[in-house]
Image (cartoon, rainbow, N blue to C red):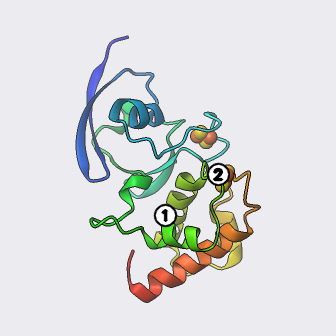
Amino acid sequence: MKQQLIQLEINNQLYEIPVTPRDLLVDVIRKKVGITGTKKGCGEGDCGACTVLMDGAPVLSCLTLAITCQGRKIITIEGLADEQGALHPIQQSFLDHGAVQCGFCTPGMILTTKALLDKNPHPDQTSIKRGIAGNICRCTGYKKIVEAIGAAADRIATREVK
Ligand code: FES
Ligand code: FES
């Protein structure tokens, strides 16, 4: 199938990538660019594992055609650490609270959390649960994830780190 060049900014780096009209964003990021933190779970929009941020908003990269993303800014889990490699406060909170087991849901869960806290820096438990409702975790039972997100909000507020 004929390929077309698109430009994507991924984690603050510009890429020119040949894509077909059928290529999914998740496959382009993982296979063509080689950034593999984004996970492909169900491939049908049900689990949230493939969540990335596009211009700051969470999108399901398994349902997004790459060709429609010309010029967009994508952040994957690899783009959250700071320039020195220090983990983002959300990542650190997930580790500190045992909110990660197999880790398959974690990149999508953390990026969804980032978008949630950007919009609502002090979410209550109900808002947190609603915010991550589209992200399925098969391991943790969610309690620790909800605690980690609350702690991340506090950590961000105290450190004034976004
Ligand atoms: S892999 Fe995209 S929602 Fe499950
Ligand atoms: S930690 Fe295993 S699916 Fe969430």
Q: Quadrant of the N terminus?
A: top left
Q: Is mark 1 on a helix, strand or loop?
A: helix
Q: Image quadrant of residue 69? A: top left
Q: In this view, does 28 lie to the left or right of 97?
A: left
Residue 102 disc label: 2
Residue identifier under label 1: 115
Q: Mark 2 falls on what kind of element? A: loop
Q: What residue type is labelled 2?
A: Cys
Residue appearing at x 48%, y 45% in the figure: 38
Ligand 1: which quarter?
top right
Residue 85 lies, in percent from the top left, at 33, 64
Q: Position of residue 45 (x, y in %)?
A: 62, 39
Q: What residue type is labelled 1?
A: Ala
Q: Percent x, y for residue 137? A: 69, 53
Q: Which residue is drawn at 61% across and 51% down?
A: 105
* Placement of 83 over or under 49, stated as above or below: below
